[in-house]
Amino acid sequence: MRAPSIHAAVRPLGLLALALAAWGCGAAPEPTIKTEAQPGLQVARPVDTVVRPEATPAVELRVVLRAGSAYDPPGREGLGSLVARLSAEGGTEALSYTALTERLHPWAAQISVQVDKEQVTFIGRCHPDHVDAFVPLFLDVLLHPRLGEADFERLRKQALSQLSEARTANDEALAKEVLEAALFSGHPLAHPAGGTEAGLTAATLAEVKAHRARLWTRDRISVGLAGAVDEALADRVAAAFAGLPETGEVPLALPPPPADARRLIVVAQPQAPATAIAFGHHLPVRRGDADFPALSLVASFFGEHRQAHGQLFQRMREARGMNYGDYAYVEAFIQEGWGRLPVTNIARSHQHFSVWIRPVPHADKHFATRIALWLLDGLRTDGLTAEQVSHTARFLDGYLSLKRQTAMRRLGDALDDRFYGLKTPLPEWLRAGWRALTAEGVNAALRRHIVPDRLAVVVVTKDAQAFADAVLAEAPSPKTYASPKPDAIVAEDAAIATWPLKFTAEQIRVVPAATLFAR
């Protein structure tokens, strides 16, 4: 462990001094920006601040920066991720990363970072007994990272290794990543949040420091506190950011996405144990828009993540036993660990509709592609009945409470409300929207925004060229089973097996997995 220098430890000037001053070791800096911490309460703080005191035995902190991968310079894709990881996993000027983790361990405290397309989120958690020691350390991680050469090389090597592993180790995640890259081709949202091989290889530590200086400005930061917190603690945390520049040179607004184009991308993965499928198109609707409650209900009815009531799940898994699950989404979705809930603070300016078909046996890939698209076509044509709308709305009303069981999740939602400009908290806004829905309104929103003819379809499989040829030729794809199926399923399968996918040669592309995300 490198011993801290006197300069690093004392720091009579700079951001660490500001953080410690705000902690009672000197005069706090004069706040400059008015921010609403709670409805109706105006508090002068230098950064946007959300405070949610709750009766929980923990202090929860989130610092969200508009500094995700979408703001990576061209040719340096991955720079934002390196900045974030080097801050969270590279130690501070006073403490090496090893010393930092040793300091946190006896407190059972945590510091982690989450990098997405537009947002980077630093997450801290500790027991109230340790808050006076933990919070300055958490702020030091953000405001005074070590940014050392050895840590930079270590984390870059890890990022390149993870990128290589993504091409081979998780075909279903790869299908979803390729889908986003296709939908946003040429756009800042196209490349993976972790970067590309060329971008990571070309990046230098000097560029990491410069990128951090350009993006770490007060107008890009939202601070959230939840649990055993109060306004005085929020004042001290927010004051630590006063030394950052108010604004920077990088615009917050992202350009419009490219137009949708119907296409089939077959990713050649010779070692794939099964076939993974994902498809979708842009969706010009986000939280806060009038049609979002209706579309969220449609997605739940069609395929709520890890729930059995969705039509995709019922028709593909339950009736046919094809795979583990099949789900639909009307905004970006990243699963929280191995659970069923999404992570918070992955808000995006431009959203997309998508369907995730979990891996199917290679022999079923053509039929699986057909039935999923056939079901979506039927959903749009038939719509939902009044009973289906009412039943799904009741499910969503209860399920929303399950999604918000922890203080950390509620805090994440509150910060996302700021991103989307919601004046009413998300639960109240969604529930009011769901209560007002009618079958006519839901089906109108469905037909306005879910358009099968605009879909990009990604299939990760072995024998990729043979599959592409079969799709182009509209070859039949009969489904077989190990045991007899009801006559209705057999008859339905026969119709699906020859249902035309209607891809032209110009719309089909075969891509070797090994070449993905090289640039």
Image (cartoon, rainbow, N blue to C red):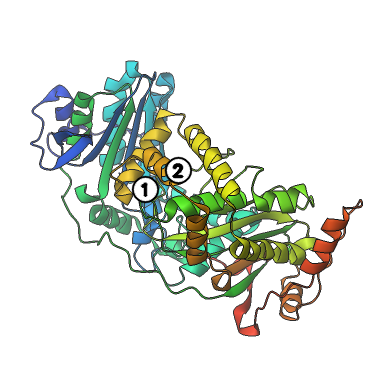
Mark sitting earlier along the chain (1/2):
1
Q: Secondary structure at mark 2?
A: helix
Circle 1: is it few (<14), some (14-19), or many (20+) Cα within 10 Å? many
Find residue 299 and report its horizontal and vertical position in percent.
55, 52
Query: Is 340 placed left or right of 475 in the picture?
Result: left
Q: Would residue 331 be seen by someone viewing this image from the given angle?
A: no
Q: Which mark is residue 229?
A: none
Q: Please give the residue where the numbered disc 2 appears in the rendered image.
A: 435
Find residue 343 and report its horizontal and vertical position in percent.
47, 42
Query: Is 506 placed left or right of 345 in the picture?
Result: right
Vertical placement of 508 versus 205: above or below?
below
Q: Please give the residue where the numbered disc 1 appears in the rendered image.
A: 120
Find residue 392 and report its horizontal and vertical position in percent.
56, 44
Q: Nearer the viewer, residue 17 or 121?
A: 121
Q: Nearer the viewer, residue 362 or 296?
A: 296
Q: Residue, x 51% and y 48% (percent of image)?
A: 334
Q: Would residue 305 be seen by someone viewing this image from the given angle?
A: yes
Residue 12 occupies which quadrant of the picture?
top left
Vertical placement of 61 versus 308: above or below?
above
Q: Secondary structure at mark 1?
A: strand
Q: Nearer the viewer, residue 261 or 252?
A: 261
Q: Residue, x 87% and y 53% (percent of image)?
A: 486
The quarter of the picture where the N terminus appears is: top left
Find residue 31 and report its horizontal and vertical position in percent.
11, 38
Query: Is 158 placed left or right of 428 in the picture?
Result: right
